[in-house]
Image (tube, grey):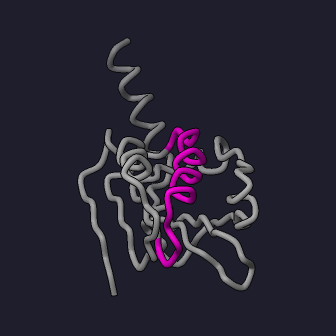
């Protein structure tokens, strides 16, 4: 029974695709884009957009079922304005995502202003269980 459970669990994890979730800002649509890139096919992505107005109003989208076929092993914030309000919003949004297992957290080309300690700690706590690599990239 123990061996069978282990095999079934391994099959379950093998079926889920490994991916990276990238959060960027699309100025032409005035929206944040959450895109998943499959590890084996970096050009293929699934994405959803969250309008900046929704972020400012605090209107949350339910991501519980959006990424259930993926294992999100990377989380990247790229090319966006990052303040405490925005960061708290995305932490709340991603906290319901059961497949979020980020081993890598990357903040890349972000404009940081009014970023308070508690918001950054919230992000770190969201990722803390799995996190191995933390990187800040500035160009």
Q: In percent of the image, x 36 and y 25: which residue is there?
A: 6
17 left or right of 121 in image:
right
Q: In percent of the image, x 69 and y 72: which residue is there?
A: 31
Q: In percent of the image, x 74 and y 59: which residue is there?
A: 54
Residue 11: name its quadrant.
top left
Picture coordinates of residue 99, whole percent (x, y): 50, 43
Picture coordinates of residue 115, whole percent (x, y): 43, 61
The number of discs equals 0
Q: In percent of the image, x 45 and y 70: which residue is there?
A: 113
Viewer-proximal residue among 130 and 137: 137
Viewer-proximal residue among 71 and 21: 21
Picture coordinates of residue 133, whole percent (x, y): 25, 58
Q: Tell me if residue 63 is in the magenta stretch.
A: no
Q: Which residues are magenta?
A: 78-99
Residue 24: name its quadrant.
bottom right
30 left or right of 44 in image:
right
- The correct choice, above or below, for 138 with respect to 21 in the image is below
Q: Tell me if residue 88 is in the magenta stretch.
A: yes
- The correct choice, above or below, for 48 with respect to 10 in the image is below
Picture coordinates of residue 118, whole percent (x, y): 40, 46
108 left or right of 43 in image:
left
Location of the N terminus by quadrant is top left
Q: Of all residues shown, which one is farthest toward the top?
A: 1
Location of the C terminus by quadrant is bottom left
48 left or right of 126 in image:
right
């Amino acid at each position: 029974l123990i061996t069978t459970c282990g095999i079934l669990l391994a099959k379950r994890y093998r079926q889920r695709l490994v991916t990276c979730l990238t959060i960027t800002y699309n100025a032409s649509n005035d929206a944040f884009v959450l895109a998943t890139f499959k590890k084996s096919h970096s050009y293929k992505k699934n994405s959803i957009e969250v309008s900046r107005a929704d972020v400012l109003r605090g209107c949350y989208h339910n991501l519980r079922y959006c990424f259930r076929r993926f294992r999100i092993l990377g989380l990247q914030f790229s090319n966006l304005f990052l303040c405490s309000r925005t960061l708290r919003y995305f932490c709340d949004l991603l906290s319901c995502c059961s497949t979020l297992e980020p081993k890598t957290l990357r903040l890349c080309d972000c404009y940081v202003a009014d970023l308070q300690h508690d918001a950054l700690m919230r992000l770190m706590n969201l990722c803390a269980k799995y996190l191995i690599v933390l990187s800040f990239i500035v160009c």
